[in-house]
Image (cartoon, helix red, strand yellow):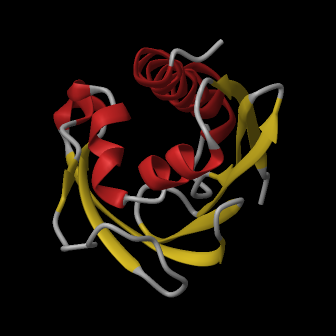
Amino acid sequence: MKIHRLHRCQQLNATLAEAWRFFSDPRNLAKITPPAMGFEILSDPGPDTFEGQIIVYRIRLALGLPCTWVTEIRHVHAPHQFVDEQRSGPYRFWHHRHQFVEKDGGVEMTDEVHYALWPLPGAGLLHRYYVRPQIERIFDYRTERIREKFGAD
C-alpha cells in the first residue's frame, strides 16, 4: 500500500482559543469545504470534538457520485491538536492531524494528511492526475476561506 502525504501550514491572525474553537467544531467543516463537493454532515456531531467521536458525512465524488464518509476523532489534545481517521469512505487509509501552535502573535495551523488509495488497476495514474490534484484543490479552497475568516497570511 502506497501512503501519500499532504502537508499544509498557515499563519492565522487569531488567538489559540479562537482557532481551537473554530476548527474543533465539526459543524464548521462545511464552511471551508468547496461547495461542489456537496458536503453534508449526516450525524449530529455537536459543537465539540472529543476522542472516539464518530462523524458521518456525505460528499460528491467524480461525476457527482455520492459517497458516505465516516470518520473517528482518534486523539484530542486541546487546544493544540486533534486527529481524525477515516473508518469508511473513499480512501483505503486516511489520517489527518490538525495542529495549532502559538507563533508570531498568532497561530500557526498545520494540516498533515496521510492517505492511500484502494488497490485498483491504474491507481498510480488515478492518484497523479485526479486524486492528488483534487485534494490540493480542496486544501487550496480551505486556505482561502481560512484567510477570509482569520485574516491569515
- Relative horizontal placement of residue 10, taking residue 22 as reference (left or right): right
Q: Position of 29 compared to 142: left or right?
A: left
Q: Quadrant of the C terminus?
A: top right
Classify residue 107 as left or right of residue 71. Answer: right
User: In this rendering, would 88 be left or right of 109?
Assistant: left
Q: Residue at x 41, y 23 (%)?
A: 149
Q: Is residue 59 above or below residue 35?
A: below
Q: Residue furthest bottom?
A: 52
Residue 124, position as x, y percentages in the image: 69, 35
Which residue is pictured at 27% across the width and 72% down the height?
A: 45
How many dots with numbers? Answer: 0
| Residue placed furthest toward the right | 104
Q: Quadrant of residue 60?
A: top left
**Residue 47 placed where, x, y %?**
31, 67
User: Does residue 147 sit above or below 20 in this rendering?
Assistant: above
Q: Quadrant of the N terminus?
A: bottom right
- Front one among 129 and 84: 84
In the rendered image of this protein, does residue 2 appear above or below residue 79?
Answer: above
Residue 104, placed above or below residue 29: above
Looking at the picture, tell me which residue is in the foreground, 141 or 137. 141
Quarter location, residue 10: top right
Q: Position of residue 88 (x, y in %)?
A: 42, 72
Q: Which residue is depicted at the point 64% across and 47% down?
A: 16
Residue 90 position in % (x across, y down) = 43, 55
